[in-house]
Image (spheres, rainbow, N blue to C red):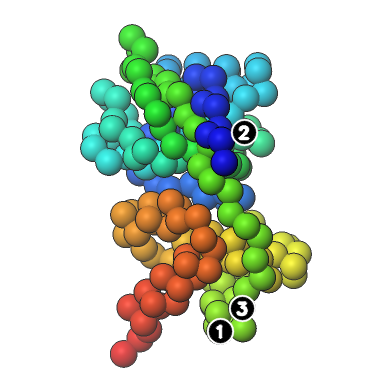
Amino acid sequence: MAAQPPFAEVPLFPLGTVLYPGGQLQLRIFEPRYLDLVRECTRTGSAFGVCLILEGSEVGVPARPAAIGTLAHIVDFTHREDGLLGIVAEGGDRFRVLRTRARSDGLLRGDVQQWPEETPQEVPVEFALLQTILERLIETMGPQWRHAPKSSFDDAGWVGFRLAELLPLARDEQQQLLEMTDPLQRLTVLRDILPRFQKA
């Protein structure tokens, strides 16, 4: 298959969390470079890239981002009580960062290439326990998914990404699950992780 051409320059937002396709991200925006990012994306209708921070922090000098990230589309704005701008972004396609450069204000921009899309697959019966666990987690921790259609719980990719969001996983585990391109492999890893969370 021919390689996907890189997107035009995408502004990058390194964070201490992983955004998955279809996921939601709420952010407080206060640094001038990220206010510029929001203005740019709002004006052009474009996305920004979210990458897990490997070295550095979310504020100050540019952090070193993971090579695989997720495009984020701004879907809502809020003006917070603390006077800061809040945004809600939704995860889209995944990408690989080919090159990065930092502007004088510290905003990272990158040339990115689309990460391989997954083939939609139904959740096999041997992973039915994961569907049940996800339903319980959503009841207590994922209110944004409470009205998700029942068909979503039959989609192996959707189930895997939502579990990866809601389970208390280490950041490197979250990143590993993001980078997988086989939804059944992701469910296998999640199933093998579950005993860690069982009460003695």
The answer to whether the residue labelled 1 contacts the one labelled 3, judged by CB atoms less than 8 Å apart, is yes
- Callout 1 amino acid: Glu
Q: Which mark is residue 104?
A: none
Position of residue 146 measured from the top left corner of the image (x, y, whole percent): 68, 64
- For the residues labelled 1 and 2, the Cα–Cα distance comes to 36 Å
Furthest-top residue in this view: 104
Given residues 167 and 54, the one toward you in this image is 54
Position of residue 107 measured from the top left corner of the image (x, y, whole percent): 39, 19
Residue plotted at (60% across, 67% down): 156
Furthest-front residue in this view: 1
Given residues 127 and 54, the one toward you in this image is 127
- Callout 2 amino acid: Ile
Residue plotted at (66% across, 35% down): 76
Counting residues from the start of the chain, the first of labels 1 and 2 encountered is 2
Q: In the figure, is residue 78 to the left or right of 164?
A: right
- Callout 3 amino acid: Pro
Q: Residues within 10 Å of mark 3 (few under 14, many from 20)?
A: few
Dot 3 corresponds to which residue? Answer: 124
At mark 3, the secondary structure is loop
Total tally of numbered discs in the picture: 3
Q: Residues within 10 Å of mark 1 (few under 14, many from 20)?
A: few
Residue plotted at (41% across, 70% down): 189
Q: Which mark is residue 126?
A: 1
Given residues 128 and 179, the one toward you in this image is 179
At mark 2, the secondary structure is strand
Q: Which mark is residue 74?
A: 2
| Quadrant showing the C terminus | bottom left
Position of residue 147 measured from the top left corner of the image (x, y, whole percent): 73, 63
- For the residues labelled 3 and 2, the Cα–Cα distance comes to 33 Å
